[in-house]
Every structure is written in structure tokens, then in C-alpha cells.
Amino acid sequence: MYWENDVETKDRGSLEAFQLLRFNETVKIAQKSPYYHTLFIDIGLDSDGIDSLESIKNIPFTTKDDLRENWPYGLLAVPKDEVIRMHASSGTTGRATVVFHTAHDIQAWTNVLARCVYMAGMRKGDVFQNMMSYGLFTGGLGFHYAAEKVGALVIPAGAGNSKRQIQLMRDFDTTVIHIIPSYALHLSRVFEELNVDPRNDTKLRIAFIGAEPHSEKMRKKIEEIYGIKAFNSYGLSEMNGPGVSFECPYQNGMHIWEDHYFVEIIDPHTLKPVSEGEEGELVLTTLMREGMPIIRYRTKDLTRIIPGQCACGRTHRRIDRIKGRTDDMMIVKGVNIFPIQIEKKLMEIPGVGTNFVIILEREGYDDMMIVKAEVQNELFAGDAKQRESLRKRIIDELRTDILITPKVELVGPGSLPSTEGKALRVIDNRKE
Ligand code: AMP
Ligand code: ZN
């Protein structure tokens, strides 16, 4: 049932002792990078390290800006010829953040991600179709190596080309897929067009979904459409990529692997730790990396630690599904709103389709939110009154949650742009 019994169920005391040991080892390695070398001198941290995990909070955070300013090699802690792989963040703005891995790092990452997919139920004998983009993005090669490690047959399908994806699934009896949630919904429409029923005409049983925020409703929708179990997978390229935290079969939060990452949740304004169970920004320290260790990285992702033990017996704590990023928060008429709140509401309303986009405009001095939502074909082609009542219902339901009244436009299935990568949910035209 466990990939690594002794690690996954280690008692908290031993796990924390191990973390301290690895943290101090990480300090020794990081010291060899130009960036941390200078930082440690500035703060007076020497190779003796620290004597309790508590003291980690005295070390400054590392931010994306630090990575950018020290691009490309400033955080590299080994000679360049030790590096065997490079990955980058999928960011579309600014210079992509690059991360370098040694052979040891790739092996460690592969193993921790194998732990995840095994936990969710993938085994030797499964056929795994990896529908993530290969290349610099970590979702391709990361999962590819992990799936091979557990012994599955890997189909490196890559992203996009929906009809071919479906063809591959049917030709080779794919049982497990790795897919971006918004793309899973888009693909369900292509299934419809082809008159293929994913529940009955495929052998699918598991999906790993991640790379972008999604709600419980969206997971349920994917599970229903495909007749599978969908497991939330969280990671970021700065911390390797996928494999940071992952759902177990109880699907109640994602176990975060504390032998690989030291976890903190901070208040993004005061930068102080929040109390256990409270929501805040996730801060992570790599404990197993040698090529490019990163200490106290501010992920900008908002989540919380779920208090209590998981029934699966793993002792590594769980984080809640990511609510959004501190930087994808919209402020509309002074109200803080996350795209995920809109998604959650839309997914609850019968008749609403699989894609939506939020457009922000300025009318005079006033902010205006326009939500364009795809509706199901019967509704779009059907009775205008019914459509209007759906539109009003969406406005009402959104208003109760986000406290402002959006304009809502209903559009036909497939009419909004969809991407093979992370969905673009917000178009903010207020900036000019
Ligand atoms: P990248 O480094 O390009 O892979 O992007 C990593 C970012 O994607 C994270 O910091 C999150 O904001 C987002 N992300 C990844 N996985 C998830 C997930 N399961 N749920 C929500 N957001 C996610
Ligand atoms: Zn569990």
C-alpha cells in the first residue's frame, strides 16, 4: 500500500529530527552557491547550521525576484558539469525561472513522485498517458520518469491534439492519465463530438489532475464524465515540479512530503507564521536537493495545513487544495476575489458548460466584472426563456458569494478559447 513504508509512516519525532539534519546539510550545500554564500555571511549563518527547526524562521525568505535577479546560475551550488537537466516555470510574464538538477536530484524527484502515483493507485501493468507538455515544463518529464519507475507502460502523448489523445487511449487501453483539469473538461467535448463515451468506451480508471487551481466541484465533474478517480497533484518548478504534495485515496487534502520539503504557512502581509489550520502563503525549503537548493521559498500559493491525522496512516501533513495565488487575486470594487470562487459557483449550476472567462473592465471610475460562461448545447440551442433564467440564476449565485454583481453572458459550447496548458481565466482590461 505504501511505496516507502518506513518514510511515509515515520513518526513525527523522527521525521522532524530528519528534517533538522537535512536542513543543516542543505545549508552546507547552498553555501557553495554565490547567492546563499553572500546571504549566509550577511546573516552570520555558518556551516554549523542551526540547532532547532524553530530557528529556520530567522533566515530570510527567497522570492521569485531573487531567482530572477540571480538568473541563471546565482543559486547553482555545484559545478556546472554536475548538472544533467534544466527545467523552467511556465510563467508567461517576465523571464522564466530556471532550475538545475544533478543526477541525484533527478533520482530523488523521480522517487518522491513515484511515491505519489503509487499512493493514488498506479501500478505495474497500468498504461499511463501523459497529456502534459514535455520540454521545459516539469509535468511532462517529471511524471514520465515516475511512472516508469513504478513500472507502468508510459505513452508520452504530450499536450494537445485531442482527437489523437482519444485515439491513443482507445488503441492502447490507457488506464491512467495525467491532465490539466481545464483541458480534461475541454477534451470531454471532443469525446462528445466523436460520439465516444469515456465511461464505457475506454479503460480509464485514474487521472492525476494539477498544474492549476480547480475546485472540488470541478474534480467531481471530471470524475463523473470520465468514470474515474481524479487525484489532485500540486507542485512548482522551483521545488522540482509535481511531487511536492498529492492526494491519497482518502482525497481529503494533499500529503506534503516533509522529508523532501520543510513546510511553513505565513501571513503574506505580516510574513509571520499563521496558527495551525489557518490559511496563508505556502513557504517551502528543499531538503533533498543538491544542484540548486532553495531556502524558504515564497510560493505565492494560498492554502492551509489540514489539522489532524489522515486515515491512510501517512504521517506527512496535508495541505488543502490551493485556493489561488496571492498574485491571481482580483480586486474588484475593493473586494478580493479569486477566480476559483467563480469556478466553484459555476460548476454547481446545472446547464453550465465546461469553460468560462472573467473579463474586468473599467466604466468611468467603476470596476465591472463580466463573466462569459459556456452553456450546454441543449440550453444554448433551446428555449430563450430558459436561458435567461439560467443567466439570472448565475448572477444571483455569484452575487451571494463574491458580493458584487457581475454581468453574465452565456455562450455556446466550445466558443471560448481553450489552451493545452494552464487555463487563462482572467482578462483584466482595467490596466490601461
Ligand atoms: P510551474 O512552476 O510553472 O509548474 O507552476 C507552478 C504553479 O502552478 C504553482 O505555484 C501553483 O500556483 C500552480 N499549481 C500547480 N499545481 C496546482 C494544483 N494542483 N492546484 C492549484 N494550483 C496548482
Ligand atoms: Zn492520506
Image (tube, rainbow, N blue to C red):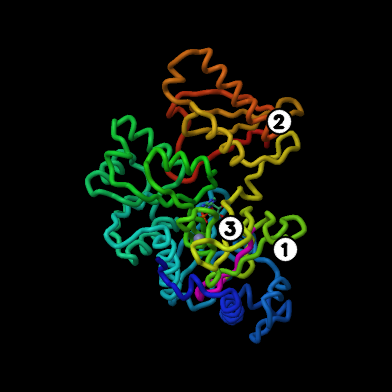
Q: CA distance from mark 2 to mark 3?
A: 29 Å
Left or right: where does residue 211 sit relative to residue 227? right
Labels 2 and 1: the sequence-earlier one:
1
Q: Report if the beta carbon of the residue with label 2 is closer than 8 angstroms to ligand 1.
A: no
The reply to whether dot 2 and dot 3 touch (C-beta < 8 Å) is: no
Q: Which residues are magenta?
A: 282-293
Which quarter of the figure has residue 154?
bottom left
Q: CA distance from mark 3 to mark 1?
A: 15 Å
Left or right: where does residue 94 sit relative to residue 157? right
Image quarter hosting the N terminus:
bottom left
Q: Amino acid at mark 1?
A: Pro
Mark 3 secondary-structure assignment = strand
Q: Is residue 384 above or below residue 30?
A: above
Can you identify the residue that label 1 sits on? 273
Q: Is residue 408 above or below residue 55?
A: above
Quick check: is 290 in the magenta stretch? yes
Location of residue 20 in the rendering, given as x and y in whole percent from the top left corner: 61, 79
Can you identify the residue that label 2 sits on? 404
Location of residue 314 in the rendering, given as x and y in whole percent from the top left corner: 51, 66
Mark 1 secondary-structure assignment = loop
Can you identify the residue that label 3 sits on? 319
